[in-house]
Image: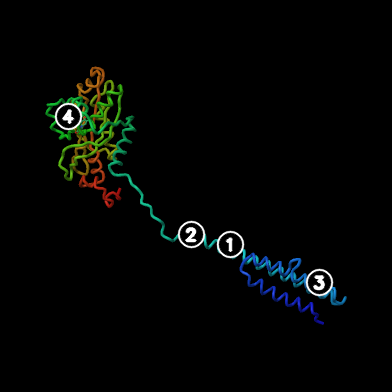
């Protein structure tokens, strides 16, 4: 016979199942557990009426109650697992990175072709035991000319058109001025290179600029000869152009070297003048207090723009200064 309790248990089972199935979060699920299975929950409440049952109904109803309890318990556990899994899935979905989305592109800076040329020349000479020296761009007449064996009415001053300041100072026309400054402050043996900016009153065109860059090379010691100069320059050109290119040393003239030469390299079927050089004039050594009977030296000067243009096949020097991204991005 179906007792009152039995039907109460059935109702409880049904309402618990549907309530649990429709919960969507863990805290209301916990509330349901307390509501149905807690110490003072609905199941306990119903079971309190067990005392009124006949001895023959009691074990049967007891078994039904246990079964309902464990069914509800299982449903709770399953629902709890589902909700936890759903929570994890949601978290994973919300944290997913879509690697197919276009990224934020950060523009990368590049080394300017003039700087990379300077860096290469420095690397080569550092490999030959040279260190890097610097001097000011605003120079006195003394360092730019006079100490370099070019006194005031020397005709060679016309070789370089100079920007003068009212106070008699000038914008250095070459990095040779650094030779004097370095020798004044150091004793031989000397091996330095001095990269830097120089200025001339030149009309700007495809191959001239009023501001450009040079690298000065200077070695002073005992017994240095023109062979040392030639060997050094040839080794430098070999490393710079990546090959043993035909080279000519042509006799030339610079006030601060004697003898002087200009060097041409055969590059892509043409002879290109790449630098000036020579043995440091004894008057230059005297100007810095070195005894030319004891010391000899060689020096060279080269234009960076020229090297950069040869190397990268750049047809117009102005491209190196006008910061056109389309041009610069190629390097
Ligand atoms: N200073 C020279 C110029 O600007 C280049 C030069 C020639 C530098 C011969 C030297 C050298 O050191 O020995 O035209």
Could you give the CA–CA distance between mark 1 and mark 3, rounded to whole angstroms? 40 Å
Could you give the CA–CA distance between mark 2 and mark 3, rounded to whole angstroms? 56 Å
Could you give the CA–CA distance between mark 3 and mark 4, rounded to whole angstroms? 120 Å
Left or right: 65 in relation to 156: right
Q: Which residue is mark 1?
A: 88
Residue 38 visible from this viewpoint: yes
Q: Which residue is mark 4?
A: 254
The quarter holding residue 117 reads top left
Label 4, residues with CA under 10 Å away: few <14, some 14-19, many ≥20: many
Q: Tell me, yes or no, whether the two marked residues, 1 and 4, touch with CB atoms within 8 Å.
A: no
The quarter holding residue 112 reads top left
Outermost residue on the bottom side: it is: 1
Residue at position x 16%, y 39% from top?
202
User: What is the x, y in percent for residue 38?
Assistant: 74, 66
Q: Counting residues from the N terminus, which is met first, the one under dot 3 or under dot 4? A: 3
Q: Which residue is mark 3?
A: 48
Residue at position x 14%, y 26% from top?
152
Q: Counting residues from the N terminus, which is met first, the one under dot 2 or under dot 3? A: 3
Q: Secondary structure at mark 2?
A: loop
């Amino acid at each position: 016979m179906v007792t009152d309790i039995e039907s109460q248990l059935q109702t409880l089972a049904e309402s618990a199942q549907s309530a649990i199935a429709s919960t969507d979060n863990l805290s209301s699920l916990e509330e349901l557990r307390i509501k149905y299975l807690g110490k003072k929950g609905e199941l306990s409440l119903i079971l309190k009426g067990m005392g009124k049952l006949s001895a023959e109904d009691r074990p049967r109803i007891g078994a039904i109650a246990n079964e309902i309890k464990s069914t509800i318990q299982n449903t709770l556990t399953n629902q709890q697992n589902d909700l936890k899994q759903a929570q994890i899935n949601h978290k994973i979905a919300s944290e997913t990175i879509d690697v197919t989305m276009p990224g934020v592109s950060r523009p990368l800076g590049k080394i300017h072709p003039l700087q990379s040329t300077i860096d290469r020349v420095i690397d080569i000479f550092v490999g030959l035991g040279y260190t890097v020296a610097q001097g000011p761009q605003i120079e006195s007449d003394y360092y730019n000319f006079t100490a370099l064996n070019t006194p005031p009415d020397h005709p060679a001053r016309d070789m370089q058109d100079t920007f003068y300041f009212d106070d008699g100072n000038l914008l250095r026309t070459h990095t040779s001025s650094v030779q004097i400054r370095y020798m004044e402050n150091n004793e031989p043996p000397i091996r330095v290179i001095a990269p830097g900016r120089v200025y001339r009153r030149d009309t700007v065109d495809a191959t001239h600029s009023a501001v450009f860059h040079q690298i000065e090379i200077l070695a002073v010691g005992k017994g240095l000869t023109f062979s040392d100069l030639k060997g050094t320059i040839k080794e430098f050109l070999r490393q710079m152009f990546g090959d043993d290119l035909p080279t000519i040393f042509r006799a030339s003239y610079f006030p601060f070297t004697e003898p002087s030469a200009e060097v041409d390299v055969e590059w892509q079927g043409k002879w290109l003048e790449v630098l000036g050089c020579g043995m440091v004039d004894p008057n230059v050594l005297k100007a810095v207090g070195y005894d030319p009977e004891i010391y000899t030296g060689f020096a060279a000067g080269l234009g960076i723009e020229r090297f950069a243009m040869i190397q990268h096949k750049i047809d117009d020097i102005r491209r190196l200064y006008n910061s056109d991204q389309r041009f610069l991005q190629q390097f």
